Amino acid sequence: MASSEERLHILQMIQNGKITAEEGVKLLDSLEKGDPRNSQGKSTLQGNESKQSRWMRVVITDLKTNREKINIRLPANVVDAGYKMGARYTPNLNGSSSNKILEALQMGETGKVIDICDNDTCERVVITLE
């Protein structure tokens, strides 16, 4: 049975650079497949793989220089698992943007989900599902 502590440990290994995101995805998938609670149904990110978004890309651009500051691609199931664990520790995590991302992930959508310009920090944040 996969516990939230096991999932958190995998996410921490990814964060600390001990394993790659792809290796983390494989570990999380193996935990889910071995979890008897999932034997009758599929998790929100499994199912018709051709229809599901499998990656989330976050691009942060400096509006002054028009240069990308961050361009990262994360496996969708890592995002989903991280959000669920983070929600336990951060009560204010249920903002409209994060809910929009989770709903899009669960629906298997692809394409641009968030496109926000922050004039205070002069940054643009774009989140897409691939």
Image: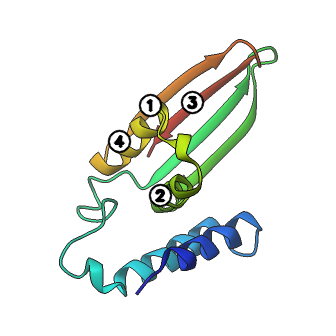
What residue is drawn where x is 40% and y is 87%? 1
Q: Nearer the viewer, mark 1 or mark 3?
A: 1
What residue is drawn where x is 62% and y is 28%? 125
Tell me where residue 22 appears, x and y as whole percent.
57, 69
Task: Give the Cα distance between marks 4 and 1.
Answer: 12 Å
Q: For this view, does 37 lie left or right of residue 58? A: left
Q: Which residue is mark 1?
A: 96
Q: Which residue is mark 2?
A: 84
In the depicted structure, whether residue 115 falls above or below residue 73? above
| Disc on the earlier residue, 3 or 2 | 2
Q: For this view, does 97 lie left or right of residue 53? A: right
Q: Residue furthest right?
A: 65
| Disc on the earlier residue, 4 or 3 | 4
User: Residue 52 falls in which quadrant of the image?
Assistant: bottom left
Residues at circles 1 and 3 in contact by the CB criterion of under 8 Å: no
Q: Which residue is mark 3?
A: 126
| Disc on the earlier residue, 4 or 1 | 1
Q: Nearer the viewer, mark 3 or mark 2?
A: 2
Q: Residue furthest left?
A: 40
